[in-house]
Image: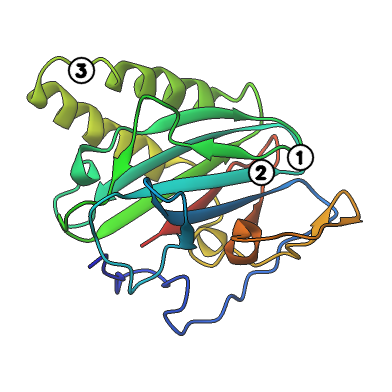
Amino acid sequence: MVKCGLLIVVFFGCGVAYTHAVDKNNPYARVCLAVRNSVTGEEVALRATSTPGKDKKIVAHIDATAKCEAVVAAFNRKTGQLFNNWLPQFVQVPERNEVLLPKAPFAWDLGKEVGPLELHVLIFAPGSKEGAELKALVEAMQNAKAQKIADLQANKLRELIGRAKVDKLASDRGGKTDATEVGGVFRMVVGFEWRDSARSVNFSADKPASLVFP
């Protein structure tokens, strides 16, 4: 089972209400984690009660009202190392266009339970110093040749994520936004609509944003 942490506010059906409202007059990003069946293609939002299983994988949906950069990294909350050896991802997010992670050939396999998951999503305005540093590290992690090096890189990644000057309240309690609103146009959706379960957070050139998913 993917366990809810007790140290941070729980998301997706753990009984805690969102209290941090997103400001729609300023740039914001939306993020949803989902469990996808790689055979059927079916998706459901990741919840505290989600369980590992054959053909199950985690995917992250991201969009934003302004161009931005995002880093997504999953850690085992007990060990501090990468969760199930999932490699982190760095991505450029176009304005008002969805990005799906992880990018092929990488996959975040949820085939077995390996401890409590804590997933971090950092959002930066394009060209930021913090984003450039994280991008370089994430790219280096894709080519680590030894486990010892990978572990050191994971520690460095956690350090950089913890150092980011973000609103901690917003990180833990990112608010909900209207899932049907994209550029003021009402959308009719069939099937899984990830925006219904997304968390949202504001970001700016002066202040990156963070969301933590336990």
| Mark 2 surroundings: few (<14), some (14-19) or many (≥20) residues within 10 A | many
Would you say the residues marked 1 and 2 are in contact, meaning their CB atoms lie under 8 Å apart?
yes
How many numbered discs?
3
| Mark 3 surroundings: few (<14), some (14-19) or many (≥20) residues within 10 A | few
Which amino acid is tagged 1?
A: Arg
Residue 109: % across, % down: 27, 44
Q: Say which label, 1 or 3, has the lower sequence index.
A: 1
Residue 147: assigned label: none
Q: Distance of mark 1 from mark 2, alpha carbons?
A: 6 Å
Residue 70 against residue 181 in the figure, above or below? above
Q: Which residue is mark 1?
A: 96
Which amino acid is tagged 2?
A: Asp
| Element assignment for label 1 | loop
| Element assignment for label 2 | strand
Residue 137 against residue 36 in the figure, above or below? above
Q: Which residue is mark 2?
A: 63
Residue occupying image coordinates x 32% and y 45%: 74
